[in-house]
Amino acid sequence: MTATLSSQETRLLARQNSITNTAGYSGNNLQANLLILPSKHSQDFHNLCLRNPVSCPLLGISSIPGNPHKITPSACIRNHHDFDIRTDCPSYRVYKHGKCIAANKPDLLDLWSTTDNSSSSEGYTAFLIGCSFSFESALCNTIPPLTPRHQVTNTIVPMYRTSLPLLPSGIFTNATVTVSMRPYHESDVQRVRDITRPYLATHGEPVDWGWDAVKRLGIRDIHDPDFGDRVEFKEGEVPVFWACGVTPQMAVEAAGDKIDGLVFAHEPGNMLVTDWVVEDLERLKGGIAAFQEYLN
Amino acid sequence: MTATLSSQETRLLARQNSITNTAGYSGNNLQANLLILPSKHSQDFHNLCLRNPVSCPLLGISSIPGNPHKITPSACIRNHHDFDIRTDCPSYRVYKHGKCIAANKPDLLDLWSTTDNSSSSEGYTAFLIGCSFSFESALCNTIPPLTPRHQVTNTIVPMYRTSLPLLPSGIFTNATVTVSMRPYHESDVQRVRDITRPYLATHGEPVDWGWDAVKRLGIRDIHDPDFGDRVEFKEGEVPVFWACGVTPQMAVEAAGDKIDGLVFAHEPGNMLVTDWVVEDLERLKGGIAAFQEYLN
């Protein structure tokens, strides 16, 4: 019963590297995309998230540059005495000059040392970004269910690069939005929009839908996703597109060697499980600024 | 010395209809674009702003549907006993089914009655949206100054419709971003970006720049703005584009007859002067959710 594990229990399993995919774990908790940058770039990246909250909804930020234990707001990770963002995802990726140079790393302890700050006097800052797992549960649990196709086929949701610009912030320029796609019958689109609308902190309602949207979004080939697996369309179905948590990694790629130092991210599907629960989404809709400690 | 008037003094002049343009009044205070909708549509419009904060940065919302006196956060308009959003802009516009049906109205008292709610049992909700006046002061006051061209020529900033989608929310679909444009020498663009970056609550840094941006944004003709006045480019200058507070009105136009009831807006240039001051911008960068009362 992985769904009933507490968030702390799932994080401990991830730390021990005894799980490789967090899908289905701690069912009521929000899972997060992770991006860790040299702190000198954190202001630009923070503003990028604030300017593009549909693609990059913030669930938490590490409070102190270089400190891998404390996250703001504290409701995101309550027990900071037993939390380490360098180990508590099952698996990590490493980027240099915008390129992925290592994948499937079980932890970041060798690359982010809290005693040796020789590579950067300020250390790293971690950003936790909402992911679509939460609204997918809502789609599955509605009556009649609107279960996403890739869950039925047990494949990875198809994702596409688009021509939709991510609004620039500092060194983060020339990036575009990446979208995920779930096919639905045309007559279900309004229900799908209504159900996912309240999930503002986890990408919210679709950014576009219908066959015309493929061209509007500048998608190369709907049958050949840039990431994830292809899914089939049934008679009467149209593609429905949501902003996707891969977008921040695309922003890092686009920034290229303007980023001075290493960048770390979670391995796709290997998310950080937070202490936020679905019931927190209403309070999170205006962003984590709603939590008083945010600017203290 | 209009610049040294308090925000309350400027609002009283606006209420008495003794001014017709708020530019230059209460210099340190943030001025707001105004949009007032039937309260039944306020959730969709609120989400539209949260999803598109660069175009539609929220500075305040009326706290109680149908009440034209109280704004949340209260720091936006402190003295609610002597404030009325139906009179305290110099001049208003009225929209019906997405079309402007009246302009240059001195007040809204005949259309929004607080005693007669026959047209809508819930009344209206007002949204105050950041405007670019604040960052223009910063551009003028830097050394050497980067005074926007339209201020030198004493004309209205040129504005353009773009093909950049406003991310949809509920009934607000198929709208696009409107941008304002200020020409700068290519070598000044980085400084212009740096100076306007902190003004997240008032559109922030440019969304795009350079001659290539004209095509990327789908602008029809840079020398023929859709709103405002044409400006000349000097040798070596390129267009620099910011999101623009006209965008919410474009969203209302696009929603058309999906809006049940009247919509009110300020007359361009005739803004609502708020009690926010430039020094509040840091706290406003994460949105008005940073103010605790927001969700109470």
Image (cartoon, coloured by chain):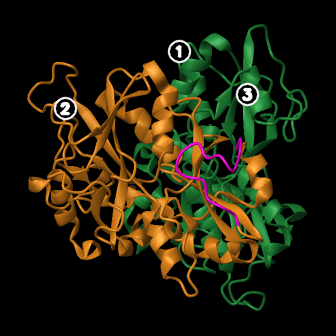
Chain colours: A orange, B green
Callout 2, which amino acid?
Answer: Trp
| Image depth: mark 3 or mark 2 in front | 2
Residue B63 is a magenta residue: no
Report, in whole angstroms, how far the alpha carbon at label 3 lies from the one at label 2. Answer: 39 Å
Q: Secondary structure at mark 2?
A: loop
Q: Chain of mark 1?
A: B
Which of the marked residues, 1 or 3, is nearer the chain's N terminus?
1
- In this view, the residue in front, A116 or A154, is A154
- In this view, the residue in front, A70 or A187, is A187
- In this view, the residue in front, A265 or A67, is A265
**Residue identified by numbered label 2:** A112
Give the percent coordinates (x, y) of residue A133: 43, 64
Which span is picked out in magenta?
Answer: A219-233
Q: Is residue B270 visible?
A: no
Q: Chain of mark 2?
A: A
Report, in whole angstroms, how far the alpha carbon at label 1 lies from the one at label 3. Answer: 27 Å
Picture disc at residue B143: 1
**Do the CB atoms of the residues marked 1 and 3 lie less than 8 Å apart?**
no
Which residue is pictured at 68% across the width and 84% down the height?
A: B114
Report, in whole angstroms, how far the alpha carbon at label 2 lies from the one at label 1. Answer: 41 Å
Q: Residues within 10 Å of mark 1 (few under 14, many from 20)?
A: few
Q: Are marks 3 and 2 on the same chain?
A: no
- In this view, the residue in front, B44 or A8, is A8
Q: Residues within 10 Å of mark 3 (few under 14, many from 20)?
A: some
**Residue identified by numbered label 3:** B213
Q: Are marks 2 and 1 on the same chain?
A: no
**Do the CB atoms of the residues marked 3 and 2 lie less than 8 Å apart?**
no
Q: Residues within 10 Å of mark 2 (few under 14, many from 20)?
A: some
Callout 1, which amino acid?
Answer: Ile
